[in-house]
Amino acid sequence: IEVLQRSAVKTVNNTYVVVTTPGGDREIRADTVVVAVGYHARNDLYEAMRDSEKIIYNIGDSLEVRNIMQTIWDANQVARAL
């Protein structure tokens, strides 16, 4: 797993994500994106998407602020349940 620090998601679509990094914009092929940021739980994105047709899971900092390893464990549990 590659962890990008000091970076921001610029664009997300069905096949890739554009991320602005200190070294410039990067296009990363992905069908799943996990974002872990901040020190306060914020689930605005989850709430905005919860009624969409997509399958949505609220994990990581959106659910409760913890460290990246706990977020990876949450993602692992979701993936195993699919």
Image (cartoon, rainbow, N blue to C red):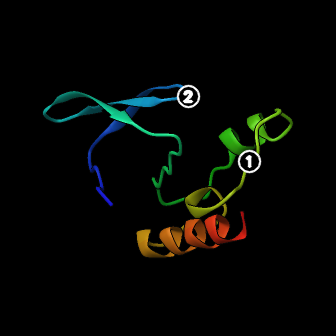
Kind of residue indicated by mark 1: Ile
| 24 sits to left or right of 15 | left
Residue 81: x and y, percent?
A: 72, 69
* Above or below, comparing residue 22 to residue 65 in the picture: above
The residue carrying mark 1 is 56
| 33 sits to left or right of 20 | right
Nearer to me, 34 or 76: 76
Q: Earlier in the sequence, mark 1 or mark 2?
A: 2
The residue carrying mark 2 is 14
Q: Secondary structure at mark 2?
A: loop
Q: Quadrant of residue 17?
A: top left
Please tell me how crowded label 2 is: few (under 14), some (14-19), or many (20+) other residues with Cα within 10 Å: few
Residue 35: x and y, percent?
A: 48, 49
Kind of residue indicated by mark 2: Asn
Residue 65: x and y, percent?
A: 55, 66
Q: Residue at x 55, y 28 (%)?
A: 14
